[in-house]
Image (cartoon, rainbow, N blue to C red):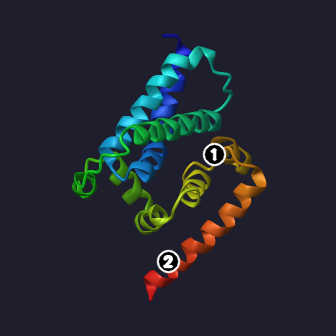
Amino acid sequence: MNDDLNNDIDSIMKNVYPPLLIYATSLTKNPLEAEDLVQEALYRFLIYYDKLDIDDEINYQGWLCKVIRNYFLDTKRKEKKKKDIDHYLTFLQRQENPNNVLTQFIKKNEYTLLYEKILQLNYPYKDVLIFYYFFDMSLSTIASILDLKTNNVKIILYRSRKMLKEELVNEKL
């Protein structure tokens, strides 16, 4: 491996892995499956690294998020008839584990309540909020990941903020 690839991988693992895990968990509602999604995305990144025309870390995030989303949707289509209650129980058990990367990240940044409320939102509201606030992505980057127009992302962001605000106000009452 060359030094550029090693530096890119180190940067991704330090800066991008926790938000990727948050996004994957928001899709799966299961930290174990989320870790598998992130690992698959990173594996594909390593395979296609030389072929990718990506200049900065934000584009890495966008590409990896798109891989995670597409892989998740493909997997769900294949498992459409299977439903498993253990997902929710595993999620609760893993959340209590202090060594869980996701748990550490959320507690460290005090996003627990906010994150829980975001998870209750439906697609695409949840995705747009996660990309915008946890990844610090631009609206145009989010639009390209979700295959939407930038104006649509603006509208979705406005509506999702409004829904989130209502949920947080209701929580305080």
Q: Secondary structure at mark 2?
A: helix
Query: Residue 79 or 134: which is nearer the viewer?
Result: 79
CA separation, marks 2 and 1? 26 Å
Query: Residue 18 or 145: which is nearer the viewer?
Result: 145
Q: Position of residue 132 (x, y in %)?
A: 62, 54
Classify residue 127 as left or right of residue 31.
right
Res 108 quadrant in image: bottom left
In the picture as drawn, the residue positioned furthest to the front comes out as 81
Q: Position of residue 153 (x, y in %)?
A: 70, 55
The residue carrying pointer 1 sits among few (fewer than 14), some (14 to 19) or many (20 or more) residues within 10 Å by Cα, namely some
Q: Residue at x 45, y 33 (%)?
A: 13
Classify residue 85 as left or right of residue 55.
left
User: Identity of the amino acid at label 1?
Assistant: Leu
Is 169 placed above or below 102 here? below
Q: Is disc 2 in contact with disc 1, using a CB cutoff of under 8 Å?
A: no
Is 96 placed above or below 68 here? below
The residue carrying pointer 2 sits among few (fewer than 14), some (14 to 19) or many (20 or more) residues within 10 Å by Cα, namely some
User: Identity of the amino acid at label 2?
Assistant: Leu
Residue 101 visible in rendering: yes
Q: Residue at x 45, y 61 (%)?
A: 119
Count of numbered badges drawn on the protein: 2
- Give the residue pinned by disc 2: 168
Q: Secondary structure at mark 1?
A: helix
Q: Position of residue 9 (x, y in %)?
A: 49, 25
Q: Residue at x 25, y 58 (%)?
A: 92
- Give the residue pinned by disc 1: 146
Q: Of label 2 and label 1, which has the lower sequence position?
A: 1
In the picture as drawn, the residue positioned furthest to the right comes out as 151
